């Protein structure tokens, strides 16, 4: 049996919006300080348009069958009257093109896309700092949210933890979409340090169970790595798209996570992220 993973903090604490840095040396403080250069260097180069869905990455076909409720490559979260809901959709069959989500850019909502790796420390920092406030806007009918899971950090672990975490995300989208956001919060709350093996597959399931997220069909999907091929193809498609790449201060061009897009605009190093997301200071 695997060693019981050490619980870093509760799910609620992981989602807390912390606007003031904590004491030096605290891991979350370090991640927050790292967020600005990491996110700013992750901008998607996309030209906004006046037509439906014009700000979305144009997808290419995927040879692997995808999870249900991710027709666009993302899980789509909308809301009204104080509640959020995941929009349901069919599973993509092998060889089908993902369908760009159509939004009316002239409506009053802010349409947010996040490209997230559940193994990514800066993604955890983004979620901890902005996630709860963003979901409140979604619940109020003021924003929509598309979450694109990718796996770009296998090289930071001694196992394929990034891929296995993204497979877990796809499993929740497919088998228990209403638990996706809770699962994401739990995975970030128990995110392992880079440089080690990450969580084993059994430990991923144990973390979820310990947070009260127990779905037998999801467990079997995680254990079977059902969507690992889809994760690899989704990641390759997104990271190879020139519009998803940016040039870092040292001149290196590439893709990194988290990448944040709102109404076709990306965080450009100068615009406050609260402003981009339509959040109050």
Image (spheres, helix red, strand yellow):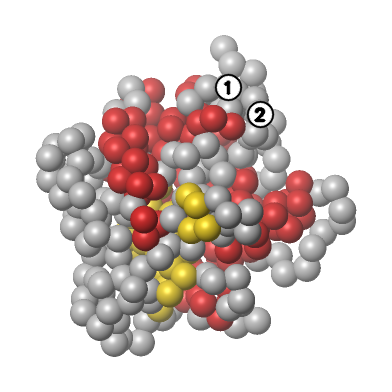
Q: Where is residue 207 in the image (x, y as percent from the top left)?
A: 55, 34
The residue that mark 1 highlights is 158
Q: Do the residues labelled 2 and 1 touch (CB within 8 Å)?
A: yes
Q: How far apart are marks 2 and 1 (CA)?
A: 7 Å
The foreground one among 6 and 267 is 267
Task: Name above or below for residue 52 compared with residue 90.
Answer: below
Quarter occupied by the C terminus: bottom right
Residue for point 47% across, 39% down? 152
Q: Position of residue 139 (x, y in %)?
A: 42, 73
The foreground one among 219 and 248 is 248
Q: In this view, does 28 lie to the left or right of 221?
A: right
Label disc, if present, on residue 64 of the rendered structure: none
Residue for point 58% across, 28% down? 157
Q: In this view, does 215 lie to the left or right of 269?
A: left
Sequence-first tag of 2 and 1: 1
- Determine whether the residue tagged by mark 1 lies in a helix, strand or loop: loop
Q: Where is residue 142 in the image (x, y as percent from the top left)?
A: 41, 80
Image quadrant in which you'd find residue 83: bottom left
The residue that mark 2 highlights is 195
Q: Where is residue 280 in the image (x, y as percent from the top left)?
A: 60, 82
Within-10-Å neighbours for mark 1: few <14, some 14–19, many 20+: few
């Amino acid at each position: 049996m695997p060693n019981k993973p050490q619980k870093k903090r509760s799910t609620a604490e992981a989602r807390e919006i912390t606007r003031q840095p904590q004491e030096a040396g605290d891991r979350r403080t370090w991640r927050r300080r790292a967020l600005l250069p990491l996110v700013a260097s992750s901008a998607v180069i996309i030209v906004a348009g006046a037509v439906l869905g014009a700000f979305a990455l144009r997808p290419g076909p995927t040879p692997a069958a995808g999870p249900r409720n991710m027709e666009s490559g993302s899980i789509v979260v909308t809301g009204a009257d104080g509640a959020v809901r995941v929009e349901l959709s069919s599973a993509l069959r092998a060889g089908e093109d993902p369908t760009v989500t159509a939004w009316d850019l002239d409506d009053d909502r802010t349409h947010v896309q996040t490209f997230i790796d559940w193994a990514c420390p800066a993604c955890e920092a983004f979620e901890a700092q902005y996630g709860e406030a963003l979901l409140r806007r979604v619940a109020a009918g003021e924003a929509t949210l598309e979450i694109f899971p990718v796996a770009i950090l296998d090289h930071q672990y001694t196992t394929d933890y990034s891929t296995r975490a993204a497979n877990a995300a796809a499993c929740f989208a497919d088998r228990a979409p209403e638990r996706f956001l809770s699962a994401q919060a739990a995975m970030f709350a128990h995110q392992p340090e880079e440089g080690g093996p990450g969580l084993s597959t059994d430990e991923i399931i144990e973390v979820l169970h310990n947070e009260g997220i127990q779905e037998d069909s999801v467990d079997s999907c995680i254990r079977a790595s059902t969507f690992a091929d889809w994760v690899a193809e989704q990641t390759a498609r997104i990271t190879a798209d020139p519009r998803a790449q940016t040039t870092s201060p040292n001149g290196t061009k590439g893709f990194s996570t988290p990448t944040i897009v709102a109404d076709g605009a990306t965080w450009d190093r100068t615009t406050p992220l609260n402003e981009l997301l339509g959040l109050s200071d």
